[in-house]
Image (cartoon, rainbow, N blue to C red):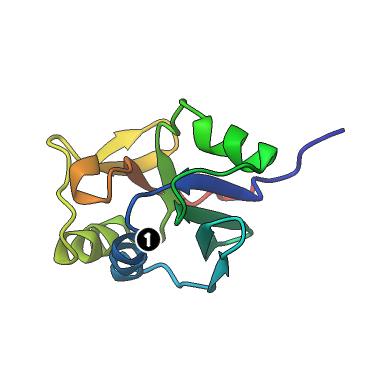
Amino acid sequence: MTATKIHHIGIIVDDLESTVNRFKGFGLSLREVVENTDAGYKIAFFPVGDTLIEFISYTKDEDENPMNRVVRSQKGAINHICLEVEDIDASIGEFEKNGARLVKGCPKDGITGRLAFFYPETTEGILIEVNQSPIQELS
């Protein structure tokens, strides 16, 4: 088996409405919100290219479903989400306009191009990187 792309990144959040509003403010489009009242969760899907960011909020305190118990008990965390952007300066402006605060020393040049990080406490607890890759010319 060979993986060809990231399908989605799943992140459990406490306040789905706040997260949805914040990420819409960052320029992402909400595809849909799905609720499963029996299983006790709501999921908001944000497409970014061919990948989805999936924000999950649980509406029940406890769950007898074995799969949900495993998912909810996951103690690890995603380090960051990197969003490729066409214009890093415009993206930074949009993020800041919507309450995100740029990490000191950003933007800066990195391995994959010009990049910037935002403090997680200003982006719903998620470390977000925006990256503007240099244009690759064919020789």
- The residue pinned by badge 1 equals 16
**In front here: 78 or 86?**
78
Quarter of the image for residue 6 reads top right
Q: In the image, is 71 to the left or to the right of 96?
A: right
**In front here: 107 or 39?**
39
Q: In the image, is 29 to the left or to the right of 121?
A: right
Q: Where does residue 39 sit, x and y in percent of width and height?
A: 60, 55
Q: Where does residue 62 sit, x and y in percent of width and height?
A: 50, 43
Res 133 visible = no
Of all residues, the one furthest to the right in this rendering is 1
* SS for callout 1: helix
Count how many numbered circles sit on residues in the image.
1
Q: Where does residue 96 sit, x and y in percent of width and height?
A: 16, 59
Q: In the image, is 139 to the left or to the right of 82?
A: right
Placement of the N terminus among the 4 image quadrants: top right
Q: Where does residue 65 sit, x and y in percent of width and height?
A: 66, 43
Query: Residue at image x 19%, y 63%?
Result: 93
Res 31 visible = yes
Q: In the image, is 60 to the left or to the right of 92?
A: right
Of all residues, the one furthest to the top in this rendering is 76
Query: Residue at image x 24%, y 58%?
Result: 89
